[in-house]
Image (cartoon, grey):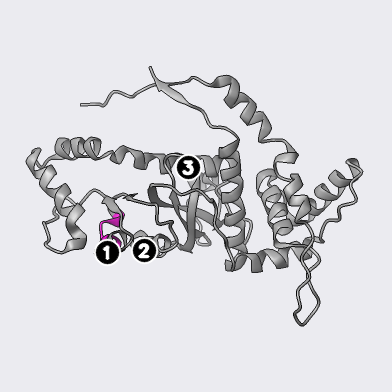
Amino acid sequence: MAKDKRSYKVRNWAAYNQALINRGKITLWIDQEAKDKWWAKKRKKNGRPFIYSDEAILCLLMIKAVYRLAYRPLQGFCQSLFEILHDEQRVPCYTQICRRASRLGQQVKKLSRKQPTDLVFDSTGLKVYGEGEWKVRKHGRGKRRTWRKFHIAMCPDSHEVMLFEVTDKDESDGRVMPELLELAPSSVTRVYGDGAYDTQTCYRAILGHGAEAVIPPRRNGICRDEIYFKSRTKALKIIAALGDDSAARTLWKKLCGYHRRSLVEATFSRFKRLLGDRLWSTKPGSIRSEIYAKCLALNRMTNVGMPKGVMV
């Protein structure tokens, strides 16, 4: 039996429409705070000191991601922008931006200062090398196709990306979650994930963080006595009491609020539509800094304004 597809209507069109317009304003990306932190602080270290701060490089990387510019056009774009504004702010050379970007990826800071109570984990693929969809469909898949796996933990309330990690395409989701959870704020009390996170390692990490796991157990799963499997055993017993079939699993998802996990799919969709599903960078450090800048840009767009829907 086919499910009825629910329809939603945006009820804050005026505010959301203005938010979409504001996303294109250059002042959203180069604000007064970025200009105040443009120059690097003097440090007593050997070697030539940096002229531009990490905040300045990160600001340029966000502009690069939003407007989808290569490094050389990025330098020219920002130089001409400051000239038009009669601003004496200098712009680093494209080679310096590229070098600093690879180092910046090694010291990623927090994406958000908020203290969420819920986190949703998932992953998707981002292409480094490879043909487009048209070529693959018409002539078949080539050999030189390279992907990176992009793992995130997002807040279902604010829709912000809170944590991220980049791994090889074959890395399992269950191995990455404990590493990200170590960086999560202590305010997190519920962790959502799909069946890929139904592993002993994930349940141990979630319990160690003092949170509750909302993860669908596998169909042939059995109840375990270990304390870290408490939430999993509870889910198995509820599903068994409801009939232990597909309808029972669907009802369990409604009862525990598992539907919130779908918000991470919407986040990935927004990420790829707004910032692209391909990576410009090829080196590990540069890839990490590129994704870091894209996550910050996506969070900034989110904070400007999001649609509020009502079911019709």
Residue 197 painted magenta: yes
Local packing at callout 2 (Cα closer than 10 Å; few below 14, some 14-19, many 20+) is some
Please state, as top left, top right, bottom left or bottom right, where the N terminus lies in the image.
top left
Query: Which secondary structure, mark 3?
Result: helix
Residue beneath label 2, please? 178
Task: Decide if residue 183 is in sight here.
Answer: yes
Mark 1 near mark 3, Cβ–Cβ under 8 Å?
no
Where does the image place residue 195, in percent across and percent down from the top left?
A: 27, 52
Mark 2 near mark 3, Cβ–Cβ under 8 Å?
no
Whichever of callouts 2 and 3 sits on the residue coming sooner in the sequence is 2
Local packing at callout 1 (Cα closer than 10 Å; few below 14, some 14-19, many 20+) is some
Which marked residue is nearer to the observer: mark 1 or mark 3?
Answer: 1
- Residue that appears at 14% across and 49% down: 236
Local packing at callout 3 (Cα closer than 10 Å; few below 14, some 14-19, many 20+) is some
Query: Which secondary structure, mark 2?
Result: helix
Residue beneath label 1, please? 204
* In the image: residue 258, left or right of residue 37: left
Q: Quadrant of residue 240?
A: top left
